Image: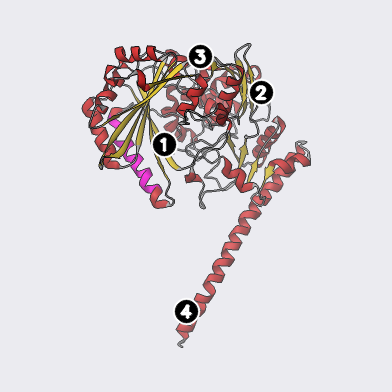
Amino acid sequence: MHNSQRHSATTMEKTPFLFIVLFLFLNFVAFSTADSVYDLFVKCFSENKIPDSEISSIIYSPTNPSFTNILEDYVRNRRFNVATTPKPNIIVTPTTELHVSAAVLCSKKLGIQLKIRSGGHDYEGLSYVSTQDTFVILDMFSFRTIDVNIADETAWVQSGAQLGELYYRIWEKSKVHAFPAGICPTVGAGGHISGAGYGNLLRKYGLTVDHVIDAKIVDANGRVLDRASMGEDLFWAIRGGGGASFGVILAYKIKLVPVPPVVTVFRVERFQNGTAADSVFQYQQIVEKMDNDLFIRVLLQPITRNKVRSVRATFIGMLLGNSARLVSITDSQFPILELKQSDCKEMSWIDSVLFWTNFDNTTAPSALLSRVPDSVNFLKRKSDYVKTPISKSGLETIFKKMVDIGKVGLVFNSYGGRMSEIPESDTPFPHRAGNLFKIQYSVSWGEEGEAADNNYIGQIRQLYSFMEPYVSRNPREAYLNYRDLDIGTTDNGKNSYTDGKVYGVKYFKTNFDRLVKIKTQVDPDNVFRNEQSIPTLPVGGRKSKG
């Protein structure tokens, strides 16, 4: 054997060994870093008078056998649960307000980014993933108490409680009360409410934040504050500005709303080679003028039907009333839909919650107490707002583009009603009057790997780009609770205000600057930061602390 061959063979023999050594070394470094963060937090928690027995049960390092399960239990987007996804150095699972205060104070003292997770439904994983090398998750899943008081029609709901649990606890106390929030039962209340969540009661009652009357929050100084002690500016900011930019939401006090003993729901399909375009066109004409008791959403989905690719339009609606009244309304206001009484189902409000969640009609309300979603897919979402009706030819062009692109669907959520009557400055959520409906772009997939991610994310970006002529502009508005990093990010460095304005104006329009001023006042050190958080004012723009 030649020397060169011997050298090559020796190298080949050594290569696996070197890879193993390198792999073990990198893992040792990672775990050493994690352990050092763990040790620092344990020491800091002790200094904040948290008993050792409590510390050991609420702080988890990657070496803890429960760490992975706790991390993955509330991951709702598989894109952020792969081998290359950055993992936290530790997870803190507080069970008391003192634990939350200690987590805030310790992350502030140590300069470590704190990610706050209430339900994990953040579409971009910002509550449990970071671009920083070192970060900590504060997971609020133990904060799930719901205290319903029917006598004064209020409830306190902690941030880690899920919407399904909230709806069930209301139903336990009253069959004719509800809360106007989202239709997905596993969404965490803290993130959903603080981002101005809403659902099918939007036109009758508005947003979640239009019914928040008090809150408890831990601020950047570790103080537990309620509405009276935090002041009206901060209370304004956490009702639609995203709580994670301003503190840790512990709980909201909400005002319940009345619902009738009987509501009526329907789900009907129309197809591209039939009346789909005409039906969606008429929907746009009447959506602002519909009876406030009626909510209709439209799902547009590319499908294969009779071996031909086309678009299906599914109209899903709910009326706070009986089926006879519903058909009377649609006959006069939305005749092309040709809704029949046989298409309608009368039921209680709690059963309508199950209907919207796609449970079958024999499911008991107790199913809403499950904190485990049916499935967790890879997904990407985006949002837009439509202010003027899209022409029938425009809709047909959009349908054709959806078929050409592949898998991306659109969801139209009807606006108007009570929600649009409230001034845009009343809460940080600015997308009120003047919008016919909001679009959610939606694509989900089950295939793993970078190629699949690039394919489907490329599809949704392509359709989003194509839709530009049909949607709002200057700014092209976006909805905070449909988090989308494509519209801008910040590294929280010296240009954070300039960076933040790019996405901030899209989410908040003219309310952005007020949010920045409040942020600068209550969290000048930017303790509560993420890749799309509210920035502080540049140093030159701040008032002196003296």
Give the mark nearest the N terminus, 4 or 3: 4
Of badges 4 and 3, nearer the viewer stands 3
Residue contact at pointers 1 and 2, CB within 8 angstroms: no
- Disc 4 to disc 1: CB gap under 8 Å: no
Q: Residue 261 shows which numbered tag? A: 3
Q: Mark 1 or mark 2, which is nearer to you?
A: 1
Amino acid at pointer 1: Arg
- Alpha carbon of mark 1 to alpha carbon of mark 2: how far? 34 Å
- Spatial CA distance of label 2 from label 3 is 38 Å
Distance CA(mark 2)–CA(mark 4): 68 Å
The x, y position of residue 534, in whole percent, is 51, 31
Residue 383 lies, in percent from the top left, at 39, 31
Q: Amino acid at mark 2?
A: Leu
Camera-nearest label, 4 or 1? 1
Q: Give the crowd class for mark 4: few <14, some 14-19, many >=20 residues within 10 Å.
A: few
- Marks 1/3: CA distance? 35 Å
Tell me if 299 is positioned left or right of 105 in this view: left
Mark 1 = which residue? 381
Q: Which residues are magenta?
A: 453-469
Assess whether mark 3 and mark 1 are in contact (beta carbons under 8 angstroms): no
Mark 4–mark 3 distance (CA, rounded to whole Å): 81 Å
Q: Nearer the viewer, residue 136 or 268?
A: 268
Instruction: Tell which of 542 and 18 is nearer to you.
Output: 18
Residue 313 position within the rendered picture, expressed as x and y whole percent measured from the top left: 31, 30
Which residue is under mark 4?
8
Instruction: Sort mark 1 into few (<14), some (14-19) or many (20+) by Cα contacts within 10 Å.
Output: many
For label 2, the residue is 225
